[in-house]
Amino acid sequence: MSDKRDAERRDGEHRTAGTNARPLDETIAQTGGGLPDDTSEQVEVQPEEMKRMGDQIRPR
């Protein structure tokens, strides 16, 4: 009976998702504190280019 309680206590200490038993708050690559969201410069697109691309992807 104590083995079951030990397992419940051990499992209760870890927040997991799925069968791989990784903690939910770890990064995807497990190398840092999170995914960077500002690693590149903003893309500048001219209005003419936006119109041209929009015309190509929208149905006529």
Image (cartoon, rainbow, N blue to C red):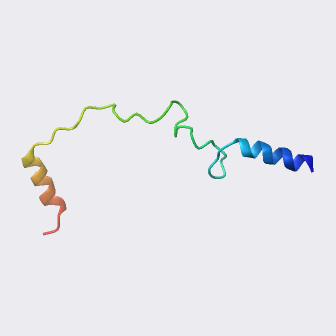
Does 6 sit left or right of 11 as displayed? Answer: right
Residue ID at (40%, 33%): 36
Q: Quadrant of residue 15?
A: top right
Q: Position of residue 7 (x, y in %)?
A: 82, 46
Residue ID at (86%, 50%): 4
Does 43 sit left or right of 37 as displayed? Answer: left
Q: Quadrant of the C terminus?
A: bottom left
- Between 28 and 56, the residue placed more toward the observer is 28
In the depicted structure, whether residue 55 falls above or below residue 49: below
- Between 24 and 30, the residue placed more toward the observer is 24
Residue ID at (15%, 57%): 54
Residue ID at (56%, 40%): 25
Q: Position of residue 30 (x, y in %)?
A: 55, 34
Q: Residue furthest left?
A: 48
Q: Quadrant of residue 46?
A: top left
Q: Quadrant of residue 10?
A: top right
Q: Position of residue 37 (x, y in %)?
A: 37, 36
Q: Residue furthest right?
A: 1
In the depicted structure, whether residue 20 falls above or below residue 34: below
> How many tags in the picture?
0
Q: Position of residue 45 (x, y in %)?
A: 14, 42
